[in-house]
Amino acid sequence: MSMIGVSVASNKSLQLEATQEAYDRAIVKLNLLLIDDKTHEQAVRTKLFEVMDERNELGDYSTSDLHVMGKGIEKAVDDFLAGLNEQTIIA
């Protein structure tokens, strides 16, 4: 394998690891919410399984896709949780 091939493979490996860590943080956040608050248990469980499924498929994506996904997952979970908080305030 050429040096360029090694560099590309290494870059993807590093990006995959960083993206997995972002997904892990999102999963922990959802799990902690399930422990602390049962108000929206079903919705949070559904989101948790969705995030876990996405994490399990990360190896199928390109390096640039992984970068975008890693940046977006924590914001997506925060937006999801903010939406739950709004539902609670309205109810």
Image (cartoon, helix red, strand yellow):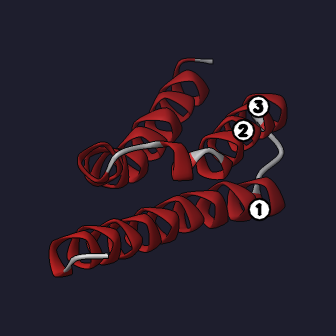
Read off the residue under disc 1.
36
Comparing marks 2 and 3, which lies closer to the viewer? 3
Q: Residues within 10 Å of mark 1 (few under 14, many from 20)?
A: few
Query: Pointers 2 and 3 in contact (CB under 8 A)?
Result: yes
Element class at badge 2 = helix
Q: Name the residue furthest left.
A: 4
Q: Residue at x 52, y 43 (%)?
A: 60
Position in image of residue 28 (x %, y %): 65, 66
Residue type marked 1:
Asp
Q: Nearer the viewer, mark 3 or mark 1?
A: 3
Residue situated in front as seen by the camera: 73 or 87: 73
Q: Nearer the viewer, residue 87 or 14?
A: 14
Name the amino acid, label 3. Thr
Answer with left or right where residue 26 lies relative to residue 9: right
- Tell me which numbered mark, 3 or 1, is placed earlier along the sequence: 1
Q: Which residue is mark 2?
A: 44
Q: Which residue is mark 3?
A: 46
Q: Which amino acid type is shown beneath numbered disc 2?
A: Val
Answer with left or right where residue 39 lies relative to residue 57. right
Quarter occupied by the C terminus: top right
